[in-house]
Image (cartoon, rainbow, N blue to C red):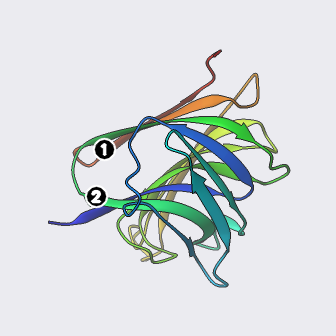
Amino acid sequence: MSKTIVIFHVLATLVVAASFARAADAWQGAGIGTPCPTGSDTWDGTTMQITGAGEGLNVKGKDNVYFVHVAREAGDFQIVARLADFTGESDSTAGMMVRTGDAADGPMTSLFFKAKENTVGWLSRVPGASSQGAPQVFASAIPLVKRPPLWLKMVRLGKNFIADGYGVAD
């Protein structure tokens, strides 16, 4: 059975209050890209805090981010996470990503908060999908009226992804 990698990625510091259990051996911190970005993560049983750096998503067709991830069986799923706090500025981002492997230029879908524009963005990359063999990239963003805390939600149904980023008062 193929695996899907579920990732929380960051280019700053974020605190995620996640709606899933974290088994101590299931989640791992790592970096994608060259040079490999560094970072750290902690888990207190209800909240994950991640600090990391990197160039970003889809920079010259490749990703360069620090992330915390777990592999799971491919198939339908739903991830809901609360971005409780965010200390990055400028081009800093934080969010969730789903990918089929750890190649920096591999297929991926990401939902993220971007500090500079105060937006929730969506980015998807399908390598070699265009007629010229270049990756096909789809991206969009919606403006927010407030900064975190906010909720991020990604759903996979078959081969389709549904994403939502929304601010809700606590």
Could you classify mark 1 by the number of other residues whose Cα lies within 10 Å: few (under 14), some (14-19), or many (20 or more)?
Answer: few
Give above or below for 144 relative to 71. above
Residue under the point 75% across and 56% down = 12
Q: Which residue is mark 2?
A: 72
Decide: marks 1, 2 in contact (CB < 8 A)?
A: no
The residue positioned farthest toward the bottom in the image shown: 35
**What x and y, as percent, mark residue 59?**
66, 69
Q: Is residue 159 left or right of residue 33?
A: left
Give above or below for 139 relative to 3. above
**What x and y, as percent, mark residue 95?**
58, 47
State the image quarter where residue 98 is shown: bottom left
**Quarter of the image with the C terminus in it:** top right
- Looking at the rendered structure, the kind of residue marked 2 is Arg
Residue under the point 43% across and 35% down = 19
**What x and y, as percent, mark residue 131?**
39, 71
Q: CA distance from mark 1 to mark 2?
A: 17 Å
Q: Earlier in the sequence, mark 1 or mark 2?
A: 2
Q: Which residue is mark 1?
A: 160
Could you classify mark 2 by the number of other residues whose Cα lies within 10 Å: few (under 14), some (14-19), or many (20 or more)?
Answer: some
Q: Secondary structure at mark 1?
A: strand
**What x and y, as percent, mark residue 78?**
34, 38
Give above or below for 81 relative to 35. above
Q: Secondary structure at mark 2?
A: strand
- Looking at the rendered structure, the kind of residue marked 1 is Asn
Q: Is residue 150 left or right of residue 136?
A: right
Residue situated in front as seen by the camera: 37 or 51:
51
Q: Nearer the viewer, mark 1 or mark 2?
A: 2
**Quarter of the image with the N terminus in it:** bottom left
The residue positioned farthest toward the right in the image shown: 90
